[in-house]
Image: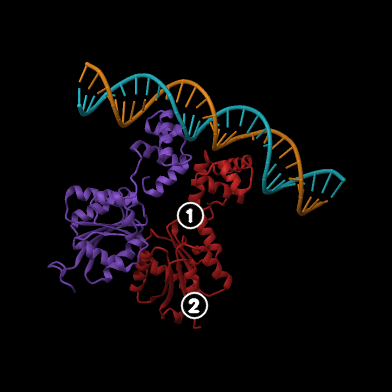
Chain colours: A purple, B red, C cyan, D orange
DNA sequence: AAGCGTGGGTGACAATTGTCATTCTCGCTG
DNA sequence: CAGCGAGAATGACAATTGTCACCCACGCTT
């Protein structure tokens, strides 16, 4: 064992959050195999995760992004605000630069994709625990490729439009006028270089701007 | 081959397929914990999976559905055609009745969702190995709830419409006339009880009819 | 041969969507 | 105070979308 410092002797205490029960359990099993890592709590959603981290003060918090009630990014942001010492590692399916950017803004120390080799996870945890930053290589390069050009309103409207709601419905749901909704949509469509609301929504989604 | 009584003593040989490397490794770790289950091969996509199963003739083949090149359902169908003795367990994120129906048609013995408890996986594998069928409870009930009401054309058209293509584009891509495309779309919309093409596409997707 | 179902097509019309220019408020900021 | 910019709304117009009633050509039945 390389002794970078004092604490590399002790086991690394981890809290794990992931909404798919099966994946949660499997990841826990994977980490428990490593002698120096111990999963002290598991959470199925953002709220549970936040509680667990505050209660256990783990060394590292590993979380998915898309979860019920509170996203992993939200939890990370909240932890940053509260200045807990816990380091955060995001593990997600999505290679969206928007997510990565938000993760870093929320103070995450790691951003990994689920399609990387399983063996690398434990290693990433150790590195992060030592204060290093671990970003999935493919993302690291193009990370700051492009900024989200959408305003809040445009985002909201686009999200609903992508679900198939008509302009009128969107308008009443947001307390706006029908015409205004169409204006925002039009703006969003042109900003994203799309031909219509559906394509615009699709583009925004794949970029992680939702 | 010995009677069912004896071989329940031996370890169950499993091949595992899943495109997300991390989940693949984690599930393998989870299964290896069990003394009576042994993961003899792992595959990252449908092709590899098929090869691995044919080469190793495992007792049970566990696979995700959505994978590159060949879906888990395709692999299952191929295995059925070839009459290998291997039993198939589908493990997926999607609670789509269409998927379940296709899985059963392809001769799968199990259909589980990733959001169930991790501990249940090993158990399901044992049951399936004994010749039982294991269907995720929530799906088992409504499984045959409703059949896909869409015709092939409607499906094609709806798929493209859902991507954001305009009627004209869809028409030229399928070699149809603009009006015909709109007729199909209109039919699909009314069959699905939607209000427009986007909603229709969304509904069809969640039902697994695509 | 008459009848029928299916896949594809027309044409017409109403509703929804996309685009623009313009207006009205606020809340800032110089 | 004047002026600017963001957020929201109007109105008008063109394009696209959704609906419907029919038409046509084939391929099968009877």
- In the displayed orientation, state which residue is furthest to the bottom: B2
**In x, y percent, where is residue B171?**
60, 44
Work out whether C12 lies above or below B16: above
| SS at circle 1 | loop
Sequence-earlier tag: 1 or 2: 2
Query: Residue sitting at 21 percent across and 70 percent down?
Result: A36
| SS at circle 2 | helix
* The N terminus of chain A lies in quadrant: bottom left
Residue designated by label 2: B55
Q: Chain of mark 2?
A: B
Comparing A172 with A162, the one in front is: A162
* The C terminus of chain A lies in quadrant: top left
Query: Residue sitting at 37 percent across and 67 percent down?
Result: B27
**In x, y percent, where is residue A172?**
41, 31
- In the displayed orientation, state which residue is furthest to the left: A6
Comparing B3 with A173, the one in front is: A173
Q: Quadrant of residue B144?
A: bottom right
Comparing A12 with A28, the one in front is: A12
**In x, y percent, where is residue C6?**
69, 48
Callouts 1 and 2 close, C-beta under 8 Å? no
Comparing B168 with A52, the one in front is: B168
Tags 1 and 2 on a common chain: yes
Residue B110 visible in rendering? yes
Residue designated by label 1: B96
Cα gap from disc 1 to disc 2, whole angstroms? 31 Å
């Amino acid at each position: 064992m390389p002794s970078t410092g004092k604490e590399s002797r002790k086991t690394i205490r981890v809290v794990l959050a992931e909404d798919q029960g099966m994946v949660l359990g499997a990841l826990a099993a994977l980490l428990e195999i490593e002698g120096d890592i111990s999963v002290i709590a598991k959470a199925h959603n953002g709220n549970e995760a936040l509680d667990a981290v505050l209660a256990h003060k783990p060394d590292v918090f590993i979380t998915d992004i898309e979860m019920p009630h509170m996203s992993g990014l939200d939890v990370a942001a909240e932890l940053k605000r509260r200045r807990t010492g816990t380091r955060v590692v995001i593990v997600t399916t999505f290679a969206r630069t928007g997510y990565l950017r938000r993760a870093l803004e929320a103070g995450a120390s790691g951003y990994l994709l689920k399609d990387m080799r399983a063996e690398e996870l434990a290693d990433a945890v150790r590195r992060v625990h030592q204060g290093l930053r671990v970003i999935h290589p493919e993302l690291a390069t193009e990370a700051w490729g492009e900024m989200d050009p959408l305003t809040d309103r445009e985002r909201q409207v686009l999200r609903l439009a992508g679900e198939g709601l008509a302009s009128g419905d969107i308008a009443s749901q947001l307390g706006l006028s029908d015409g205004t909704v169409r204006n925002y949509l039009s703006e969003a469509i042109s900003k994203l270089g799309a031909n219509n609301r559906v394509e615009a929504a699709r583009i925004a989604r794949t970029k992680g701007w939702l």
